[in-house]
Amino acid sequence: MLEACAEHGVPVVPYGGGSGVCGGVVPVRGGVALDLKRLDRIRGLRETALLCEVEAGVIGSHLEGWLGERGYTLGHFPSSIACSTVGGWIAARSSGQASTRYGSIEHLVAGLEVVLPTGELAVLRPVPRTAAGIDWRNVLCGSEGLFGVVTRAWLRVQPVPAARRFLAFRFPDFDAGLDAMRRVLRRGYRPAVMRLYDPLDTLVGVSGGGGGAGMVAQLGRAAFERARALLLAHPRWAWLAELAAGGCHAVVVCEGEAPLVALEAEVVHEEARRAQAFDAGPGPARRWFEHRYAISFKGSAVFAAGGFVDTLEVAAPWDRIGEVYRAVREAIAAHAVTLAHASHLYPEGCSVYFTFAAATGSVKQDEACYERVWRAGLAAAREHGATISHHHGVGLLKAQALREELGPLHAALGRVKAALDPHGVLNPGKLGL
Ligand SMILES: Cc1cc2nc3c(=O)[nH]c(=O)nc-3n(C[C@H](O)[C@H](O)[C@H](O)COP(=O)(O)OP(=O)(O)OC[C@H]3O[C@@H](n4cnc5c(N)ncnc54)[C@H](O)[C@@H]3O)c2cc1C
């Protein structure tokens, strides 16, 4: 099929779950939507090698369920797990909520089968590592359907963790929480999940309720809706709400072998005490875990209230992350209510995930406001040393920002694309190409 499309210059847009949030599956020149969800077989598990062979259209939660029945986990838990596919994860360089322990998708891919834009089938066999030249697995992870269609993958799996501990804290401020988490990682520990919410995100998700559920419980629905409408129309008043938050909420999940989990949890407690954090017990983290996919699907209430909501995720090293958080937040908060949390933590830095919302009173003005938020937020991220995307990718939305981040390498990327896809048929227009 790809061969025929190449011959006739018909664009082909690979389509997994369609859950990408940057316009990666939007056809800019028409053509064929190549829906991969019928490649839905899980072909087997090699228990000794800890490898699972799976077709690209398999939905994340189906794979995790299948593995769970056999005592294994992939450890990849994007909030979109129920509506995204293995191929989409690879193409968009996805990262799950437990990436600190299990790694992101690029760490989980041991082998790949891919159909090149010319129609040729290429197989990168599953191996623990390779120095056989450039590792094409890495080239394909994040290629957003421009370099080939992923049809099959061999993924690294792990036994289901024997033990799990839930911890939650209230830190006096965002910097103190970041610092405590950084110290845990620096000491060599890798809790599966570490999430730290800034004051407004703490307030909106009080007690881990998420999506304002905690506030609704405290204020009553009518008062909550009035407060939300006021905030959406007047984002600059958000500081008033922040005062009510009383610090920064954090959840931590430790998992693995029981003695290691006990030790890890002790170290997290130790560093939290050092940062003067209040120990909120296991309840809030357990509640977060039980509802961990739900929060991302609560945005429709803002649209129903006549506004818009979206998210922007950046990443930077620890010695820049506080500055990046403040700069991006300030840039966005000039136009929209802005909440943020740190997640996906590494020994050298972490990601900050901003949620922004506004309601200007007209669709036209909302659109202009939305554009301003993205431009200001991405410019601030770049200026302060962050990458423009930690895990949502580029698609159409961040094309210009990608050009600026890559500099001359963006043109080089174009030359690689031209060599692989001489007719330019695979997913044209994405990644700014
Ligand atoms: C509510 C919500 C929560 C989310 N949470 C997370 C999160 O926690 N972590 C995260 O990383 N992302 C998250 N995302 C973003 C999104 O789910 C991921 O980018 C995911 O990897 C996309 O997978 P998909 O199968 O839906 O791909 P699609 O949206 O269908 O496609 C994404 C891109 O990959 C290409 N593509 C798809 N399949 C293939 C293939 N087989 N071969 C080649 N190219 C292909 C498409 O052309 C497109 O460019 C979230 C999205 C939503 C809506």
Image (spheres, helix red, strand yellow):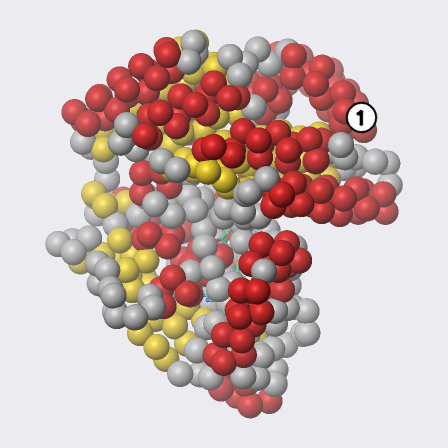
Residue position marked by numbered label 1 in the rendering: 234
Rendered location of residue 369, percent (x, y): 79, 42
Question: Which residue is at a point 56% across and 72% down the rendered structure image?
Answer: 414
132 up-or-down from 208: above or below: below
Residue 51: tell me if it is visible: yes
371 up-or-down from 3: above or below: above
**Near-viewer residue (244 or 136):** 136
Spot the residue most to the left: 48
Q: On the image, which quarter does residue 370 sit in? A: top right
Question: Which residue is at a point 68% across and 74% down the rendered structure image?
Answer: 29
User: Quick one: SS at disc 1?
Assistant: loop
Question: Which residue is at a point 42% across and 60% down the rendered structure image?
Answer: 141
Q: On the image, which quarter does residue 373 sit in? A: top right
Question: Which residue is at a point 61% across and 69% down the rendered structure image?
Answer: 433
Q: Identity of the amino acid at label 1?
A: His
184 up-or-down from 138: above or below: above
**50 left or right, relative to 58:** left
Rendered location of residue 310, percent (x, y): 65, 41
Rendered location of residue 82, percent (x, y): 46, 47
